[in-house]
Amino acid sequence: MKKALCYLIVVSVILTFTGCSTPQEPIVIKNSIDETAGWEINYYTISEMKAHSGKFSSKIDSTYQYSVAYKELLKNMKAEDLTKIRYSAYVLVETVPSSVTLVGAIGDGINKPIGWVGVDVKDKIKNPDEWTKIEGEIAVPENYADNIKFGCYLFSPNKEVAYVDDFEIIVE
Ligand SMILES: [Ca+2]
């Protein structure tokens, strides 16, 4: 009887606690803008289908050939002695594509780029359906005009499907 009473007390205590609404942690959403400066988000490519980090990646396909992109004036990236930019991103493909490329480009965005390096994803991907880190680097010309930008994005000229996530740009 004593045991049963004890049990009843324990159960009622549990019920009391679960019955009360415990104070909910507030959800805090932040954006410092600093981390997103220079990014061209291309919202229509944001996909929930696959992600290397968090919930989202950028998907390119037959409709959209350009992923989320980094595009920034060189003069804003580093004040002086900018010699080289290294860039990387994680890429996932369902089948090995013929020509999906992680591009690093330097130019004014209107005329032919003065520098362009495309890292062909098919040379790097061992297993489709696995995230693979793709890395590239581009030399920066010694004298560049104020309107010259660096751009980095995943490009699918043959409209093949690929996902990209977690870009990293390192300025040297
Ligand atoms: Ca992500």
Image: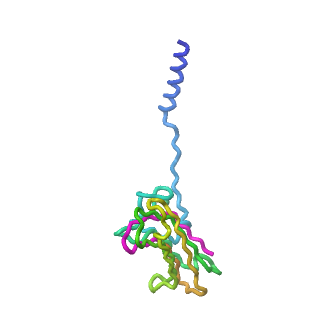
In magenta stretch: residue 148: no
Taking depth in this image into account, of 102 and 112 the one nearest to the observer is 102
Residue at image position (56%, 70%) is 169
From this viewpoint, is residue 36 visible?
no
Q: Which residues are magenta?
A: 153-172
Residue 143 placed where, x, y %? Answer: 59, 87
In magenta stretch: residue 154: yes
Residue at image position (58%, 80%) is 139
Q: Of all residues shown, which one is farthest toward the right?
A: 81
Taking depth in this image into account, of 31 and 140 the one nearest to the observer is 140
Residue 30 placed where, x, y %? Answer: 53, 58
Dividing the image into 4 quarters, which one contains the C terminus?
Answer: bottom right
Residue at image position (39%, 75%) is 157
Residue 97 placed where, x, y %? Answer: 41, 69
Is residue 27 depicted above or below 98 in this figure? above
Residue at image position (40%, 72%) is 98
Residue 93 placed where, x, y %? Answer: 43, 63
Q: Main secondary structure of the magenta part?
A: strand
Coloring applied to the structure: rainbow
